[in-house]
Amino acid sequence: MRIVAFLIVSALVATSAWARLGETAAQAAKRYGPGSESRSFPGVTDYPADKVQVRMYTNGVITVYAIFFPNKSGESVIGLMMFDFPSADAQAAARPAILEANSAGEKWEGSQWTAYSRPGATAYVANMPYDDKLVLRLNEFTEFCKGIEAKGKQEEIDKTKKSVQGF
């Protein structure tokens, strides 16, 4: 079974145009079709679910989850993607092609097994039990999430200060 999955994924890697970090929903739909809205994102929880759109694309073998967020220009683009493969071997076989498609003309640095980075983005193989998943993330998306978190904390502080006035 692992050999069959490996061969299927290897064939897909050679012929598929992978979605790329920073692409719009329309660009991703050209590559994968319309996809479907999803609120789940297995193994990844550190994003503001109420401020982004999660879409799921599948071709029957590989499932791609993409989180769209408003970038600095206000355009909704892919800030984080997770490629879900049928096995860790299939993920390892597809990883070089996915990283290349998302290089943005830069070289990915890092170990061949776990984490990579390039100017503007990071990528990692999700930890057990998710070693069949590859996650790519724009640094701008990370900053967006941190900003949302900081704003929420500040709003909570301001609300608390206001509620205690006059005591």
Image (tube, rainbow, N blue to C red):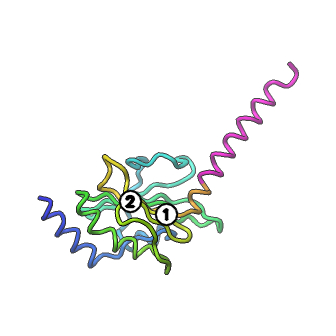
Q: Residue 117 location in percent, x, y?
A: 49, 66
The label on residue 122 is 1
- Residue drawn at (61%, 57%) of the image: 143
| In the depicted structure, whether residue 86 falls above or below residue 159 | below
- Magenta segment includes 157: yes
Whether residues under marks 2 and 1 lie with C-beta atoms below 8 angstroms apart, the answer is no
N-term mark: 2 or 1: 2
- Residue drawn at (75%, 33%) of the image: 159
**Quadrant (top left, top right, bottom left, bottom right) of the C terminus:** top right
Q: Is residue 24 visible?
A: no
Q: Residue 153 location in percent, x, y?
A: 68, 40
Name the residue that disc number 2 marks: 114
Amino acid type of disc 2? Thr
Horizontal side of residue 31 vs 120, given as left or right:
left
- Residue drawn at (52%, 69%) of the image: 22
Q: Residue 115 location in percent, x, y?
A: 42, 61
Q: Quadrant of residue 76?
A: bottom right
Q: Is residue 110 visible?
A: yes
Overall secondary structure of the magenta stretch?
helix
What crowding class fits label 1: few (fewer than 14 Cα within 10 Å), some (14-19), or many (20 or more)?
A: many
Q: Residue 10 location in percent, x, y?
A: 22, 72
- Element type where label 2 sits in the image: loop
What crowding class fits label 2: few (fewer than 14 Cα within 10 Å), some (14-19), or many (20 or more)?
A: few
Amino acid type of disc 1? Thr
| In the depicted structure, whether residue 46 falls above or below residue 3 | above
**Quadrant (top left, top right, bottom left, bottom right) of the N terminus:** bottom left
- Element type where label 1 sits in the image: strand
| In the depicted structure, whether residue 56 falls above or below residue 14 | above
Residue bounds of the magenta highlight = 145-167
Q: Quadrant of residue 112?
A: bottom left
Q: Which residue extends farthest front?
A: 111
